[in-house]
Amino acid sequence: MKHLPIIALDFPSGREALAFLDTFEEETLFVKVGMELFYQEGPAILETLKENNCKIFLDLKLHDIPTTVQKAMNRLAALGVDLVNVHAAGGKNMMQAAVEGLESGTPAGQNRPRIIAVTQLTSTSEDMMKDELLIGCPLQEAVQHYGQMAYESGLDGVVCSVHESKVIHEQISSSFLTVTPGIRLPNDQTDDQKRVATPAFAKAQGVSQIVVGRSITKAANPIEAYHQILKEWE
């Protein structure tokens, strides 16, 4: 997986997402297509992005009974994306079924998409986890436990915050992917994220991939912001 920042295309329409990407001209980009854009445009947006030489993280966070997730992943495998995800809270059987679905659905001669599991969203705080989700252990312990389940289920990595990446690599595997949203430049607003960090701090923590949204897409000069993040990250 090429070591590029992943740009979150959190736009309400394909037209707006593609207009944003047009400003980057011939650059090779790694982009994230989330629920808002995918549910609006469907698989067609993925084909267009591939035609524009983009690598794609399809961020749908599947979480359902194992059979449903297996069948959904079987369909997603044929879309030619590079990375997909599920919620680790769905449990081992569900995550194993997701891998099986990807493997059976990947066209012959192609590599299956990599698959990662969401541990705790970066909008989740310690207090929220305990008071609303009724998870009594510390947040980092919960993230590590979900990571261990994902590893044992045959997944390629997890979605976590920068602050949990190092312990996951230390306790599980240095080759296990840690994909981290909540990336901000020093002067940016944190918005609805709680556990945020800069690209430089993410690099120091050994993060595998960073996901950056509003710090690029809402910047006055998105290309300049992207290259500032790329410089810190590389």
Image (tube, rainbow, N blue to C red):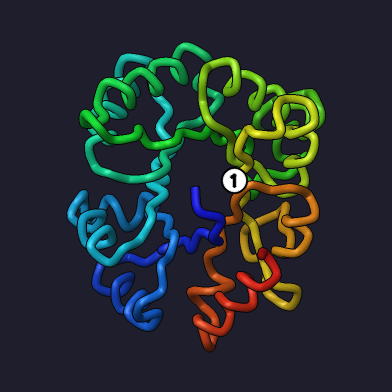
Is the residue 223 above or below the residue 184 in the image?
Answer: below
Residue 207 position within the rendered picture, expressed as x and y whole percent measured from the top left? 69, 48
Residue 135 position within the rendered picture, expressed as x and y whole percent measured from the top left? 72, 25
In which quadrant of the rendered view does residue 65 lie?
top left
Is the residue 15 above or below the residue 43 in the image?
Answer: below
Q: Name the residue furthest top.
A: 93
Residue 139 position within the rendered picture, expressed as x and y whole percent measured from the top left? 76, 34
User: Which of these two is toward me, 161 or 121?
Assistant: 161
Q: Name the residue furthest left.
A: 44
In which quadrant of the rendered view does residue 202 lie?
bottom right
Few, some or many residues within 10 Å of mark 1 (<14, 14–19, 20+): many
Residue at disc 1, secondary structure: strand
Kindly identify the residue that appears in the image at 44 percent across and 36 percent down. 114
Kindly identify the residue that appears in the image at 39 percent across and 42 percent down. 60
What's the residue type where badge 1 is placed? Val
Kindly identify the residue that appears in the image at 24 percent across and 26 percent down. 105
Is the residue 45 above or below the residue 93 in the image?
Answer: below
Q: Is residue 149 left or right of residue 163?
A: left
In which quadrant of the rendered view does residue 28 lie?
bottom left
User: Which of these two is toward me, 94 or 1?
Assistant: 1
Q: How many marks?
A: 1
Is the residue 7 above or below the residue 216 in the image?
Answer: above
Kindly identify the residue that appears in the image at 78 percent across and 40 percent down. 166
Q: Is residue 152 left or right of residue 29?
A: right
Q: Is residue 220 left or right of residue 69?
A: right
Q: Which residue is mark 1?
A: 179
Q: Name the residue furthest bottom.
A: 220
Residue 182 position within the rendered picture, expressed as x and y whole percent measured from the top left? 64, 57
Quadrant that contains the C terminus: bottom right
